[in-house]
Each structure stands twice: as C-alpha cells, then as structure tokens.
Amino acid sequence: MNEASYAQAWNDLNDRIVNCRQCPRLAAYREEVARVKRRAYRDWDYWGKPVPGFGDQNARLVIVGLAPGAHGANRTGRIFTGDSSGDALFAALHRAGFASQPTSRQRGDGLELRDAFITAVVRCAPPDNKPMPQETLNCRSYLVRELELLSSARVVLALGRIAFDGYLDLLTASGRSSGPRRSFFHGAVYEFDPPLPTLVASYHPSRQNTQTGRLTPAMLDQVFEKIRQLLG
C-alpha cells in the first residue's frame, strides 16, 4: 500500500468510527452526556461521538483500553484525554519515552506519541463504564482494522480485564489464537506465534485503581520497562 492509499485507509476507518450508530444505548448515552455536561465543563463543546484511535501509525506498541470516559474522551474527542485515567497513563508514557509531554488535555495541545498508538475495545462512553457484550462485539471490526493497518506492532498492552478479554476474543474469532485461555493479571506477558504481537497486561489506570494504590506509578513504570525490553 502506497503512502496515499495508507492515509486514505486511516481516514476511511476513522470516518466509519466517528459516524457509527450501531449501539442505540451508547449513542443515546454519549449524546445525553454531551448535552447535559458536567458543571466543571459547562463551557466545553463536547465531542459526543465515537472516539477513534490516536498516535503513531508506525508504532510498535499498541495500547488497548476499555472505552472513552464520559467526561474525558467523550468531551475532548481524543482517547484517554481529559480525565484522571489519562493523567496517569500519559505521565507514564512520557517517563518511558513514548509521549512528547506528560499531559493530554485536549486535541491540538501539541502531544505526540512516539512508537505508540492508543485505542480501545469500545468507542463510545458506556454507562457506568460497563459496555454490554454485544456492544463490544459491534466495535470489534474497528480494532481489527486498526491492527491490520498497524503492521509494525510488536507489543499489545491491554489496560484492564475487559480490554484484555476483548483482544483475546478478537484473536480467537479470527482463528489466530488457540490453546488454553490466557489469564489476566497485572504484568502478565504472553507470546504468540509470529507475526502476532506479544500481549502484556496491566491494571487499568482508573481513579479506582490509582487512588487505592492497586496501581501505582512505579507499577506502571515497570510495565513500560518490560515493554521496552520486549521491543529491544
């Protein structure tokens, strides 16, 4: 695929994502949140649409999260941007050399990812951060296509059990993974037959995990140190 065709393929995919209305419950919720807003963000023009992936399209590291935050990515239009989960993740990415700055506040803030691409198994903010199985399935083709286009990927980092299971379900459905089911635990590393990337698991950098000490900055740093070693 030449450069122009590659760029067009990304544009086509992102247009499909942003205009998706496959899940009536999620469409209604994301739009209601964007209309009502949170008082702290009452002056914001919320994004209120499905959120595409973000980052280096030649990345060797692909980070897969759960879904946009209702007042984070659903507000800003960029994955993991504008909420506490993103604060923890981008600070760690910056410390590990994958991000040009430690914060991600809004689109156009100058942030660049280096050798990393961030996406999610669900593209709309779900109520209570809990998508239904069919909603996750409806989004699967978007992640499949991203992974096809991210041909340099060597490591997939799954943030949280839902992202971990969603990625494994994708591999199973496509016939690219067999054998016993892999177990989720923080710091887990699973190798697959080439050319599939190595899978690394981490707790999700949600406020629930970071404020309780279940996931500390040091623990996230250790995960990215392990990824650096895997990438060589």
Image (spheres, rainbow, N blue to C red):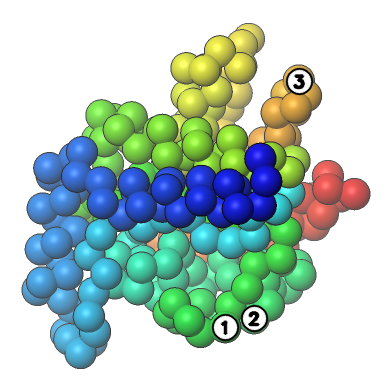
- Measure the C-alpha gap from mark 3 to mark 1: 37 Å
Crowding at dot 1, Cα within 10 Å, few <14 / some 14-19 / many 20+, comes out as few
- Find numbered disc 1 in the image and state the secondary structure of the residue it sits on: loop
Mark closest to the chain's N terminus, 3 or 1: 1
- Above or below 100: residue 28: above
* Residue 88 visible (yes or no): yes
Residue named by callout 1: 110
- Measure the C-alpha gap from mark 3 to mark 2: 34 Å
Mark toward the viewer: 2 or 1: 1
Could you tell me which residue is drawn at 71 percent across and 65 percent down? Answer: 114
In screen coordinates, is 229 left or right of 196? right
Mark toward the viewer: 3 or 1: 1
- Find numbered disc 3 in the image and state the secondary structure of the residue it sits on: loop
Q: What residue type is labelled 1?
A: Gly
Quarter of image, res 100: bottom right
In screen coordinates, is 39 left or right of 223? left
- Find numbered disc 2 in the image and state the secondary structure of the residue it sits on: loop
Residue lying at the far bottom in this picture: please name it.
43
Q: Is disc 2 in contact with disc 1, using a CB cutoff of under 8 Å? A: yes
Question: Residue 134 at x, y = what percent?
Answer: 25, 29
Question: Residue 5 at x, y = what percent?
Answer: 58, 47
Question: Residue 28 at x, y = what percent?
Answer: 10, 53
Residue named by callout 3: 193
Mark closest to the chain's N terminus, 2 or 1: 2
Question: Residue 214 at x, y = what percent?
Answer: 53, 57
- Above or below 210: residue 230: above
Could you tell me which residue is drawn at 59 percent across and 35 percent down? Answer: 148
